[in-house]
Image (cartoon, rainbow, N blue to C red):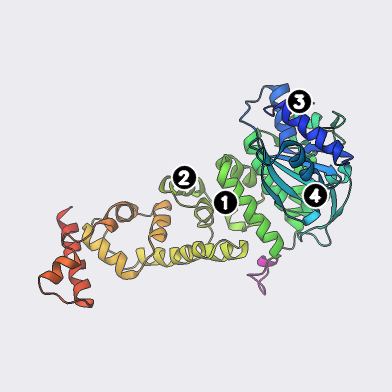
Amino acid sequence: MNLTGVPSSLLAELRSAAVGAGVKRLAIVGGAVRDGLLHERYGRVWTGVPDLDWILEGDAMRLAAELVKRCGEQRVTELQNYGSFGTVALQLDGIALDFAMARKETYPMPGENPVVEPGSLDSDLVRRDFTINAMAQDLLSGQLIDPHRGQQDLAERRLVFLHDESVSDDPTRVIRASRYAARLGFVLSPEALQQVTATVRRWPWSWQLHDAPDQAPPALANRLRMELDRLFAGEPWALALDCLEEWQAMALLDPSLQHDRGRNRRIAWAQRLGLPLLPAWLAGAPDPEAVARRLGVPGQQQRWLKQLLQLQDWLVSTDAPDVHAAPDVWTAALENQGWMPETVAFMVCSQPPQWKPLLRWWGRWRHLKSPRSARDLIADGWSSGPALGNELQRLRLEALKRSR
């Protein structure tokens, strides 16, 4: 058995340790198998050794102990036993390995977390999302295990769910599908698209009900947010979001995001300004804070989005300065209102008529300090207190006025 990018000596150590630990089957699963086949058969560029996920029929901790016995603690490092179904993580010769006992799962209710029980390698593959991720390479036998025709779907560049209730059981698989479609250039099979469409249409999203607008299945909401975090962290997000829009799948989050024409511009600006991308996307909803709250987005980001609506209203009011007002006028107005800097930056992403002074305040004006320090003023006879702070602000605004 060969794995692209994985030293054969490491595989030999794993094989010997598995035999010594009485492991019946030890197989690498998921992305490493998929990406290795794409590289070897279809010339896809190899981007390096990923974390290696291994499924075993046996005791993961016993396997780890056997590795330590054979290789020593200098080669086997960062050993962690997570307990749940014998899940163990470690590094062997600097390569990250994750071992998990084979399991099976059932969904008691659609959208809820699954009930997980010990199982076999075959049952573990069944619980995965797509056929191209349900392949395994058995280290002991050398066999490529492909019970769901993943190789054929890999060749045809299509995403196929493993069973008819795959999306209904876990709608986060739709977000995952958009990630793979964007990264790999694959398309949903007609049956997979039909499943997405049917699930989105019938799914009882409780946050769309007028009597319970802020309730959502917690497990589902958290998983949706985690998938979206992965999407924005390392995927071609514009292509992935285009897929979700094409599949009419934005209702998973909020129907208003389905026809959000300013989406890519906002997110690109957020990326440019070093802001988190998920709230920049959610800013396109009529009530972005509510969507963020449903998804369990961090509280600080929820506060930015809440202020964003208030800032939006303020900008169209008579209290806001003219777009051509001086730096000191804009700085005093923004800071007297108490807008958080990130709120102003997210407003820049939406490109209102005043976006240029908002950007200048975010990037330059707010960082300018008084030309004289508090120590200087105290030396001149000022006393500590509000009056001193007001004088420092006056001097700072005077400096801003001269900087124009």
Q: If you read the primary sequence from the N terminus, does the residue marked by circle 2 or circle 4 appear first? A: 4
Amino acid found under the numbered disc labelled 1 = His
Please say if the residues under marks 3 and 4 sit with CB atoms less than 8 Å apart: no
Q: Name the residue under label 4.
A: 166
Mark positioned earlier in the residue sequence (1 or 2): 1
User: Is label 2 in a helix, a strand or a loop?
Assistant: helix
Distance between the alpha carbons at the discs numbered 3 and 1:
47 Å
Measured Cα–Cα span from mark 1 to mark 4: 26 Å
Q: Mark 2 points at which residue?
A: 268
What residue do we see at 77% from left, 45% from top? 65
Please report whichever mark, 3 or 4, sits nearer to the chain's N-terminal start.
Answer: 3
Pointer 2: residues within 10 angstroms few (<14), some, or many (20+)?
Answer: some
Q: Do the residues labelled 2 and 4 touch (CB within 8 Å)?
A: no
Q: What residue does disc 3 label?
A: 2
Asked whether 210 falls inside the magenta stretch, the response is yes
Magenta stretch, overall SS = loop
Mark 3: few/some/many CA within 10 Å (<14, 14-19, 20+): few
Identify residue for label 1: 259
Say left or right for 62 vs 381. Answer: right
Stretch in magenta: 205-215
Q: Where is residue 79 in the image (x, y as percent from the top left)?
A: 69, 47
Between label 3 and label 2, give the one nearer the viewer: 3
Q: Can residue 162 be seen in this view?
A: no
Three-letter residue code for mark 2: Ala
12, 353: nearer the viewer: 12
